[in-house]
Amino acid sequence: MLRNDPSSASTRYVMVCCSYRGYWTSRGRPSERGIALDAAAALQWIRDDSQNQNSSVAEPVPVIIWGQSIGAGLASSLAAEPFPSELSLKALILETPFLSIRTMLQTLYPQKWLPYRYLWPFLRNHLDTWKSLGLMQDRLGDKTPYVLILEAGKDELVPSSHGEMLERRCAELGLNAKKKVVGNALHTEVVARQEGVLAVVGTIREVAQAVHEEIQTPE
């Protein structure tokens, strides 16, 4: 969440970290539907907090959604859903994302003689980043956010083909997207390395600068 001061070039960054049900100190059992509700509740919290901080702001609050691994699937799913009118999605950061849960099942169990790859309809989780990007484009049209795909150079879980296919998917949809490969990083090490940190920070700064220019430019 970004808060710009129209009278200056200063920007306040507010990071909202969602503790999903069943994780960390949150109660309940994790499920795709429940976690989606938690993510939507986080957006509502951002809207309410922004209004409490400054109820006179007429422009929507700029928001960046960032998700890692399975969280990238949740992030893209959230981006595909209707947003509160008081918020504006400006960037979507997908860190070590995969195409879909179904595709990951086939990746983990490639042997056709094993039954697991055929049991995807019975999975409790059906997150699909490929599909969500299309739904997001349909929802937002020419106001789609910038998309950053962060890939771990030595990802031991998600094949590099997933990042490549998501990059092509973005190109097909006409999304403004970039893929960054963080060399020698394992699946959970992308933002533990300087390359990954700089990629994320650069994206956030670009969004903040673009928002500030929009505010400063008279209609």
Image (cartoon, rainbow, N blue to C red):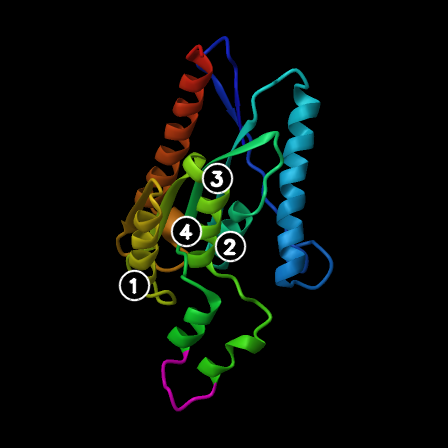
Question: Are dots 1 and 2 in contact, CB under 8 Å?
Answer: no
Q: Residue at x 47, y 16 (%)?
A: 215
Figure quadrant of the N terminus: top right
- The residue under label 4 is 95
Query: Which is more foreground, mark 1 or mark 2?
Result: 1
Query: Cα distance, mark 2 to mark 4?
Result: 8 Å
Tag 4 or tag 1, which sits nearer the N-term? Answer: 4
Kind of residue sitting beneath label 2? Gly
Rendering coords of residue 143 (x, y %):
44, 34
Callout 1 touching callout 4 (CB < 8 Å): no
Residue that appears at 34% across and 40% down: 176
Query: Few, some or many C-alpha atoms within 10 Å of disc 4 (few <14, some 14-19, many ≥20)?
Result: many
Q: How far apart are marks 3 and 1 (CA)?
A: 27 Å
Q: Which residue is disc 2 drawn over? A: 71
In the picture, the disc for residue 140 is 3
Residue span colored magenta: 109-115
